[in-house]
Amino acid sequence: MAKKKQPQETQKKKKDTNKPQQRKLAFGVFLVLLSLYLVFTFSSFFFSWQTDQSGWADLSNREEIADNIGSKIGAYLGQLFVYKGFGLAVIFPVWLLFLSGMKLILNMKKPLLNRWFWGILLMVFTSTALGFLGGKATILAGVSGYELNHFLQDYLGKLGTILLLVLIVVLYAIFKLNLTTEKAVSFFQNTFSKLKREDEEEQEQGDEEENSFESIEKEPNSIEFTTDEGEIDFIIPQGENEKLDPFTHKKEIPRLDGQEGGLEITNIPEEEQPDFTVTPTQPTEAIDPEALAKQLVENYGEYDPTLELSDYRFPTLDLLDDPKDSGIVINQEELEENKNTIVQTLNDYKIKIEKIKATIGPTVTLYEIVPEAGTRIAKIKNLEDDIALSLAALGIRIIAPIPGKGTIGIEVPNKKPTMVYMRTMITAPRFQHAEMELPIAFGKTISNETFVADLTKMPHLLMAGATGQGKSVGINVVLSSLLYKKHPAEVKFVLVDPKKVELSIFERIERHFLAKLPDSEEAIITDNKKVVNTLNSLCIEMDNRYELLKNAQVRNIKEYNAKFKARQLNPNEGHRFLPYIVLVVDEFADLIMTAGKEVELPIARLAQLARAIGIHLIIATQRPSTNVITGIIKANFPTRIAFKVSSKIDSKIILDGSGAEQLIGRGDMLYSQGNEPVRIQCAFVDTPEIKHITDFIGAQRAYPDAYLLPEYIGPEGEGVDLDFDPSERDPMFREAAEVVVNAQQGSASLLQRKLKLGYNRAGRLIDQLEHAGVVGPFEGSKARQVLIQDIVSLDRLLSDN
């Protein structure tokens, strides 16, 4: 019974998925037919509008006959949109209506909203201009165009109206046609040089025609042919009475470079063939790529990756909550009391202090002491618990000594901590003017300074801590920092959320900032099985990017993008602008429990190699045990953040030292980058604030889809249908097969470079080649084995199939 039920369920699913497509097709056909009807109706209206003036007013009277090709409805629509509307310019929205219908029919993904905006603007401008030229209400301008022109002249006069119309034309050329001063100058220079060149060619052609007969008489035995290699003179001495017919004495021979083409003189007896001289013209000089790139930059400017979303607006500050506290409140009594307690406790153990000073932070105050000469630092370090007992405070931490200073630090929590708001981080000059690739404003240090770090310098981040101590807020701080600083074209996020609730709020910005697999419906990954495919897909993306860097002869993504912006890399050769990719895993321990090595190995590979090509990892876990944070993970994550943990063992696993167990929680954290940990109060950003940010970004125009990662085929081929119908093969299947056989290398990146395809189409071609028996099965990151040795065998195989 179960076997019979499955096909019925799949058929139902297919029917359900086909319904939206059918509705789109039906609506698209309706729009196309409507636009055609309007074209004929409006065209007819220009010839019949005067006679139909009375007919359209009484549509219910069947005795009234309209001359319009669309009858009464056509006359009415023409009266409404042409005469009372915008006259001849009404053709612009009709054309856009036709394009919208064709978009739905052909299922094109190119957005038309921008075209509708400019089309409507062009309609209003054209109608107003025709109204100005006509001087009165005419059928060409329409009543609306005349009224707009009349309104402008009442307030600006004729001269002002002319200048306004000219201004609109100039602005349209600048913003829509990307007009620049360099382009305008280059256009006039090219036009002038072209006209001058044409005049010179005409003169030369006239001179050649005058001298043509003379040259034939002087060299009767010289026949000139033009080949692909340039002009080649075949000088053949002949007898006085012998004539050579070039049409009967020629056949194709190999060219000078060994390729097909060229001409040979034949049908002459072998003994009568004299020697002949071949004088090829000099080949044209190769174009210097650097000079070409420089010229392109001069003409068009550097490539701008943000141009597709040029109207994108960064999130505003009013989306974040205002700080409720005006600043750190200094309690002199508390400071004096803590100072005396510390001095007295040390004095009880016969440790004299020469100097002590306090630095007040948002949640912790640092007391720096200078002990008398001869005092052992270890002796003070051992008094950590005694000082905490004397102060009756939780979270005392002794830094002995403070790096870079000749002092010993004692961190004491404030009785009244001050919250660090995300808004103060974003507005801080250190963040606003940060010259970093991926700046992150974590929070404030003990000295009340804004702590900003560059993710590309970390280059990967490990976050750990007990439940409820601030990990999820820390991830939100990282993501919101990047959202406030980077354009959607510059950075993409791969979000893994096994808990399914922490990162779901970022779904709203899927088509702006998120990356996903091609066959995935949701960009935020909540299924642990899909995490493995995503991580392996990132490994493929990493390999592809390294191939691009190798071809571009650069070492890292920064140099590559700089070279691409300078137009020194050709997109037709597979080159593209590379955004940074940030992988965020919210609960790593759960992945290790369910997937184990399948997750750990690609994570370790990415951590080892992905820095140079712009892929950075942020991994968070609430269970910092050795089977979760293994030696491989620790070795490849030099930057770590530890929130409060329950024991020294957990602190040593995260930081390779103690200290995290003495934190006070609620965002209190230690930041380590291979040296002495820095104590920071993590900024606080609430869920409603994140929602405001994502709603603000999500409401703007976006890319057609999320950033698509390379397609990954698992070892068992899960989720991939290799049962291809030969009739449904890609049109470039044959050409792709020849490329693979000639190169004896089966990889999607090869097809990308040779055939100038996108990765997804190249991947589908590889799957079709596998099904046809041209290449072998998937072997991880290695290129597939080519099973056909030559083109002859390929022809035989494809003819059998």
Image (cartoon, rainbow, N blue to C red):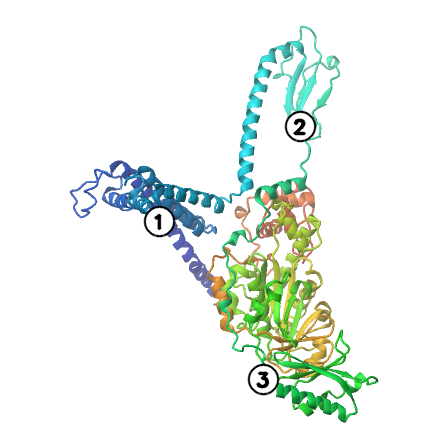
Packing grade of label 3 (10 A; few <14, some 14-19, many >=20) is few
Give the vertical position of 341 relative to 523 (above or below): below
User: At x 21% / y 38%, what residue is drawn?
Assistant: 51
Give the vertical position of 797 relative to 206 (above or below): below
Gap in angstroms between the C-alphas marked 2 and 3: 86 Å
Hey, what amino acid is under mark 1?
A: Phe
Task: Tell me, yes or no, whether the two marked residues, 1 and 3, touch with CB atoms within 8 Å.
Answer: no
Mark toward the start of the polypeptide (1 vs 3): 1
SS class, disc 1: helix
* Rendered image: mark on residue 229: 2
Mark toward the start of the polypeptide (2 vs 3): 2
SS class, disc 2: loop
Residue 93 placement, left or right of 13: left
Q: Which residue is mark 1?
A: 30
Residue 63 placement, left or right of 280: left
Q: Along the line of sight, which residue is nearer the eye, 697 or 552?
A: 697
Q: Nearer the viewer, mark 2 or mark 3?
A: 3
Q: Along the line of sight, which residue is nearer the eye, 688 or 355?
A: 355
SS class, disc 3: loop
Q: Which residue is mark 3?
A: 416
Hey, what amino acid is under mark 2?
A: Glu
